[in-house]
Amino acid sequence: MAKRFTDSEKWADPWFCEITERDRGFWMYLLDNCNHAGFWKVNWILVDMFFPGYRPDLSIFNGRIKVINEGKWFLPKYIEFQYGKLNPDSRIHASVISVLEKERVNEELLNSLLTLPSRVMDKDKDKVITNKRISVFEDEKLDRTFNAFVEMRKKIKAPMTEHAMNLVINKLKDYSIETAVKMLEQSIERSWRGVFEVQGDHGGIPEDYFRKKQMARKY
């Protein structure tokens, strides 16, 4: 089962609060069941298992759902929330871009989701290449903190490989944005190579390692 970011602030979103309980449930169902590029293969038999007889009024979703055809829907904001701007140099992002191109998403929408040097003014091209800032998350603070973590890894002479970045990104998807930020900040402050849950303070020792030491002392 894929693990994805969820927006804990949706419960305070006026739109989310005003729609019906079944509409809220269906919206969360779509977010969990679309593919990694935001496309949902329409399956009313499965929908009826959770929401018997339900058929949505798409107008209330205010553009959050785009009907491609009778058998396929697209959630335009899904990609930006999960990945931020897409970078074709990232293996994960390249896979999403491939799906978008295969589904023939219009060029204007595709370009709006991409972060490419060719879309930057000439005078800024060297700056983009030099900085190599990775845009992964839609949330600005989380994206900024993740990049600070990447820079910290460089400073301690342990630069991250793409595989290592993907492992950290996937791990952070298990947590809310606020918690993910705190986990990254903790690792930056203590110069840790990985990210760990923010729990008790054990003299700078990661929680899972501390527990193992405690268990070892009992035997």
Image: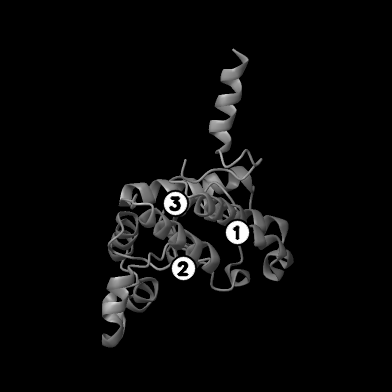
Mark 3 closeness class: few <14, some 14–19, many ≥20 residues within 10 Å: some
Label 3 – label 1 distance at C-alpha: 16 Å
Check disc 3 and report the residue beneath it.
169
Q: Quadrant of residue 154?
A: bottom left
Residue type, numbered disc 2: Pro
Check disc 1 and report the residue beneath it.
7
Mark 1 closeness class: few <14, some 14–19, many ≥20 residues within 10 Å: few
Label 2 – label 3 distance at C-alpha: 21 Å
Residue 107, x across and y down, in percent: 32, 76
Label 1 – label 2 distance at C-alpha: 16 Å
Residue 71 visible somewhere in the drawing? no
Q: Earlier in the sequence, mark 2 or mark 3?
A: 2
Q: Residue furthest top?
A: 219
Label 2 or label 3, whichever lies nearer to me, is 3
**Marking on residue 76:** 2
- For residue 40, side relative to residue 141 (left or right): left
> Depth check: 64 or 143 in front?
143
Residue 210, x across and y down, in percent: 58, 31
Q: Quadrant of residue 131?
A: bottom left
| Element at label 1 | loop
| Element at label 2 | helix
> Considering only vertical position in the picture, is 129 above or below 26?
below
Residue 68, x across and y down, in percent: 41, 66
Q: Quadrant of residue 151?
A: bottom left
Residue type, numbered disc 1: Asp
Mark 2 closeness class: few <14, some 14–19, many ≥20 residues within 10 Å: some
> Depth check: 214 or 144 in front?
214
Q: Earlier in the sequence, mark 1 or mark 2?
A: 1
Contact, CB < 8 Å: mark 1 with mark 2?
no
| Element at label 3 | helix
Residue type, numbered disc 3: Ile
**Residue at left offset 56%, top offset 19%:** 216
